[in-house]
Amino acid sequence: METELPDLPEFVPGTVWLAGAGPGDPALLSLAAWHGLRHADAVIYDALVDERVIALARDGAALEYAGKRGGKPSVDQQDISERLVALARAGKRVLRLKGGDPFVFGRGPQECAALIAAGIPFRIIPGITAGVGGLAYAGIPLTSRETNTAVTFITGHTAVGGIPDDLDWDALSRAAPVLVIYMGSRHMALIRDRLVASGRDPAEPVGIVSAATTPQQKVLTTTLAACAEDLAAAGLPAPMLIVVGRVVDYHATFRWFAP
Ligand code: SAH
């Protein structure tokens, strides 16, 4: 039987779609993001968007890289927002494509606010965030009945470069059985020290997933005590997710993705 696609939203000229591209594997795109790629006049994408996803853009779409390098924030961000507004005002269908989900640690909110301020109609298309899709490809469940009833996503790196100082590490250590840390690899030792100092067991399992869902995916399992040294020794490339918690133990039996 021929399967019909559901009705997908019309990509109206002069609008911006702020879309998540997922963690890498193009198979994880939503139908809406894929539809956007097939109809966009301009695709403005970040460094973390997989090139196999960008390759799905329709022939003739203008492809513009808007990634940030070396943590230079605000000026570039302003430029990106202005670019989105200018393209929309020129009557283009603008697909703003971000890694993972656009509203998870991705400056999507700033771009959204800029579009609103400029009066540009927009749509938000969620994506599979790396902390969910990447862990699934590593065979690490976010929750399981045996281990945890909550999960906490944190960023290990703020706009000004350090680890977040507004985090209550004591409270996290006590109340967050599973921590999924984005952008944390540069500060692995510092994060570990904070967690152990606030009472976390140094023997607790840690999983580090590099280039999740891509052919380059690597998973390192270690402990809180050894994670920084093991990470340095393994020399894994970014991007990386760090998972702290007993769910990491499932990797040994649940691992299924062997690129
Ligand atoms: N909006 C994105 C996150 C952007 S922050 C999302 O929802 O996934 C960038 C961080 O995401 C990276 O430093 C890394 O921690 C994580 N990340 C994104 N893609 C990843 C991937 N394929 N593998 C591992 N980590 C990834």
Image: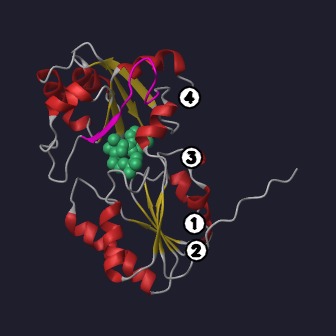
Front tag of 2 and 4: 2
Is 219 placed left or right of 256 in the picture? left
**Who comes first in sequence, dot 3 or dot 4?**
3
In the rendering, which numbered label is found on residue 28?
A: 3
Against 124, residue 170 (above or below) is: above
Q: Would you identify the image quadrant in which residue 157 lies?
A: top left
Q: How many marks?
A: 4
* Picture coordinates of residue 41, whole percent (x, y): 54, 75
Instruction: Name which residue type carries label 1.
Output: Gly
Query: Cα distance, mark 1 to mark 3?
Result: 14 Å
Query: Cα distance, mark 2 to mark 4?
Result: 34 Å
Reading the image, the residue beneath label 4 is: 257
Is 36 placed left or right of 230 in the picture? right
Give the colour scheme of this rendering: secondary structure
Reading the image, the residue beneath label 2 is: 11
Q: Is residue 38 magenta?
A: no
Reading the image, the residue beneath label 1 is: 36
Against 72, residue 89 (above or below) is: below
Q: Nearer the viewer, residue 245 or 46?
A: 245
SS for dot 2: loop
Q: Residue at x 16, y 40 (%)?
A: 167
Q: Is residue 142 magenta?
A: yes
In the rendering, which numbered label is found on residue 238?
A: none
Q: Kindly tell me whether mark 2's CB lies below 8 Å from ligand 1.
A: no
Front tag of 3 and 4: 3
Badges 1 and 2: C-beta atoms under 8 Å apart?
A: yes
